[in-house]
Image (spheres, helix red, strand yellow):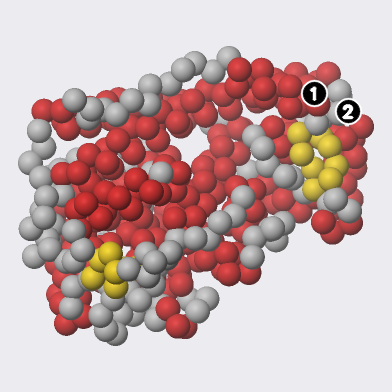
Amino acid sequence: MLFATPALDDRELEVLEEIEAAKQKLRHQLHEPRRWVGQLRRQTFARAVQGSTSIEGYVAKLDDAAAIAAGDDPLDATQETQLAIKGCSDAMTYVLQMAGENDFSYTTQMLKSLHFMMTSYSLDNRPGRWRAGSIYVQKEDSGDIVYEGPSVDEVTALMEELTGRLSVENGHGSPAPVRAAMAHLNLVMIHPFKDGNGRMARCLQSLVLAREGVLSPIFMSVEEYLGRNAPAYYAVLAEVGQGSWNPTNDARPWLRFMLTAHLRQARTHLVRIRESELLWTALERLAGKHRLPERTMAIMFDAAMGFRVRNQTYRTSLERSGEEPITESTANRDLRQLVEKDLLESRGEKRGRYYVAGGELAATREEIVHARRKRDDSDPFAS
């Protein structure tokens, strides 16, 4: 027996309509091929990976998360954090690749494969295998047990029930955000793995959403929101879990939390899309004004968005955006020119050198942010 999906009330149905309307706006705005969309998609992917791993204590700056996901070296992230982010990135990339497969099916082996990708950097995690015994979630500060998963003897049957339910519901029944939320809840409460259960539950949620096909998959993920609201995320799981595996508990608080996450994340994406378009237009003017190669707009975009950019990440960004590759010396020449024009500032020395937005570029970004419209972040379920 798994946690059951609550019967949706009128307000929940209204919020789902608001979410769908926001996603249709996103789909429309992302439909036309524009050069800045690739840059924004790469940053959005990095935010999702950063958000999911940060919940479990693997903290990295956004530019480091993006670098690791792209196969580049980070500036600050520890080795353990690098491995966790790389594993999460690989699993999420696999999810995005599977999203459009016609012969896709939910299986326990597929979930084990995702877990292996995510945690194979440590064999102690039993990557790709169910846990071997009882499992407890403890508070880091006190060591108090806050949740106990179901008996290990139940894990296989429960996970088969979960994948069976997802297969039956695939594209049918409840709206995708509801199905994805319930898949997340059930996996994290079953706690089938020794480690990485939260990351796996969030990855499964993203997979269910990606299979819906309404929007570019990475813009359907709410992992960034969950990472930014980790205390509330843990609190609602504790409220629903009540200390141990009991699928008869009311899942409505969890469902409402996740619907709120979808609505707020969609609104965040809408703001970023609008501002990315404005920024790109401003960068075109700057490139023309300073007679810069058009390719430099990619690195200016990242720097304006707060990234610490480097020769290596500049070249990777161009390659991943489908631009013509450039050599290390060409990248160095571009970077020097951007510094001379007060568009970038150099920090550090030699291998540790990186660049941040310079005066004119920072002012351009600040002007866009200053003109930002106030966003509605009220609780959609507040009485």
Residue at 43 percent across and 21 percent down: it is 375
Report helix, strand or loop for mark 1: helix
User: Which corner quadrant holds the C terminus?
Assistant: top left
Residue 189's place in the image compared with 209, above or below, is: below
Q: Amino acid at mark 1?
A: Glu
Residue 187's place in the image compared with 233, above or below, is: below
Nearest the viewer among 325 and 79 is 79
The quadrant in which residue 336 appears is: top right
Q: Are marks 2 and 1 in contact (CB under 8 Å)?
A: yes
Nearest the viewer among 25 and 198 is 198
Q: Give the image location of residue 361, x and y in percent.
A: 76, 26
Residue 286's place in the image compared with 298, above or below, is: above
Nearest the viewer among 122 and 251 is 251
> Label 2 belongs to which residue?
341
> Label 1 belongs to which residue?
360
User: Which corner quadrant holds the N terminus?
Assistant: bottom left
Q: Give the image location of residue 106, x and y in percent.
A: 25, 63
